[in-house]
Amino acid sequence: MLCKRIIACLDVVNGKVVKGTKFRDHKILGDSIELAQRYRDQGVDELVFYDITASCENRRVHEFWIDSMARFLDIPFCVAGGIRSRDDARLILNAGADKISINSPALENPGLISELVQEFGQQCVVVGIDSRRVHNTFMVYSHTGSELTTKNTAKSTVEWAKEVQTLGAGEIVLNCMDSDGVGKGYDIEQLIAVRQQTTIPLIASGGAKTAMDFVRAFREAKVDGCLAAGAFHRNELCIPDLKAFLIKEDIGVRI
Amino acid sequence: MIVIVDTGGANLASLRYAFDRLNQKAKVSQDPNEIQNAKAVILPGVGHASHVMKKIETLGLIKIIQNLAQPVLGICLGMQILFEESEESIDKMNTPGLGILPGKVIALKPSKYTTVPHMGWNKVKSITHNALLDSPTEFYFVHSYFISETAHTVSVCSYGENKISAIVNKNNFWGTQFHPERSGLSGSLLLKQFIKAAL
């Protein structure tokens, strides 16, 4: 059977890993290459680099550190941030990334998803969805990299997830903004809502603190992978212990 | 020299770096002479079967690849195009492959238990003794089309109700559905085994 994936996410600003709370107040945690190396050695299954300021910053720096990552990493990694066109995507994939993840640009131009799928293949096109509960429903937010630009798109999260799948995306990362950085576990209800309406891989993101949070997301929301950042960066959770716990709970992971 | 055939896909860099990490010189090339004279040939492939086949045809490499006598390793889509045809096509017709191995590449269907693409680490078991893999090991997969078990399947993996050909072999031609260049230590070990058998 396919193993459930444990994914470490590194929010990167100019090659440094940062972490905020509820997408705000970013603190520098360390060098992206050092952290990536550490997680790889601990047995993480995949890495995601969110270049959270890339939309407006220096593209060459971007290309250079992706290439440095690709030289030493022997596990898959995904790059997100500021990918607005096929040319942006090509640059990143040619530098050695396995997947690209798009978020706000897909909301502005949904056709970009199918363009990227046609050129590079479904397997490398991930769509990130930033979502939060508004009254009794889940709504998509865009431009969440900075406090000043975050806005409600007035799109339903479940409807957008279905559309993203129809447009050919290979995977959805659902960032549940209300639970992000709070450490009270993944937003199971929201993950279930999206899981029930989609058949492409779904990755849970936002809120992981304990090993049991991962168990619940895998068991109750049937996600394919769980992504975490702060819990790993702050050493609250160590990947080998987490995986040992998951195996004890009868959840298949790679050792 | 190992030659990685430039099929235009985007994973050329990660493959080249995988050989770098093994201190093995590998060159990305489209040149028929370089490919024919290589000690071993890697056939990568990311993207769409019809695009990769079109590229190989345009470069005049179909006959060249079919007639290679040195060890050849097709990876992911590079393995799928070793077969006769693929359901992955831009029109209603199947895309013809290189036809080196008999069989047809078919689409994975999502089910109650399986999402598509088949993405992530899955356990591969050998059903026939072979040079690439001894004991069951996890490798990284990412694909939406597959080849079920054939006469040339030497290792398999299960995904829902599907039995997927994970490693295939016919004479000097090998293929892995998974990505050894992205499969951590297990992947490096497999590439080492391939190099050992090849050089």
Image (cartoon, helix red, strand yellow):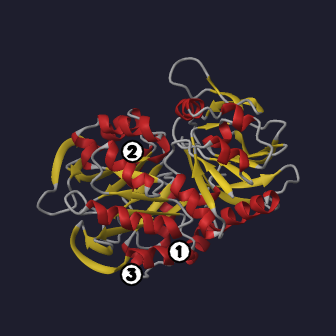
Secondary element under disc 1, as helix, strand or loop, is helix
Provide the chain ID for the residue under circle 2: A
Q: Give the alpha-carbon distance from disc 1 to disc 2, as whole Å.
A: 26 Å
> Disc 1 and disc 3: Cα gap in Å?
12 Å
- Residue B196 in the image: x percent, y percent? 79, 63
> Looking at numbered disc 3 in the image, what kind of residue is underneath it?
Arg
Helix, strand or loop for disc 3: loop
Label 2, on which residue? A194
Is B138 rendered above or below residue A126?
Answer: below
Q: CA distance from mark 3 to mark 2?
A: 29 Å
Q: Is residue B59 visible?
A: yes
Q: Chain of mark 1?
A: A
- Point out the residue furthest to the top here: B92
Q: In the image, residue A25 lies at what x, y percent?
A: 20, 74
Viewer-nearest residue: A224 or B144: B144
Nearer the observer: mark 3 or 2; the answer is: 3
Would residue B194 be found to the left or right of residue A209 on screen?
Answer: right
Number of residues whose C-alpha sits closer than 10 Å to that of mark 1, classed few (under 14), some (14–19) or many (20 or more): many
Q: Give the residue pinned by disc 3.
A: A234
Q: N-terminal of the two: label 1 or label 2?
A: 2
Please state if A200 lies on the left or on the right of B94 as rendered: left
Residue B28 — which label?
none
Q: Earlier in the sequence, mark 1 or mark 3?
A: 3
Pointer 3 chain: A
Residue A139 visible, this angle: no
Q: Amino acid at mark 2?
A: Val
List x then y, in percent, for residue A110: 28, 37
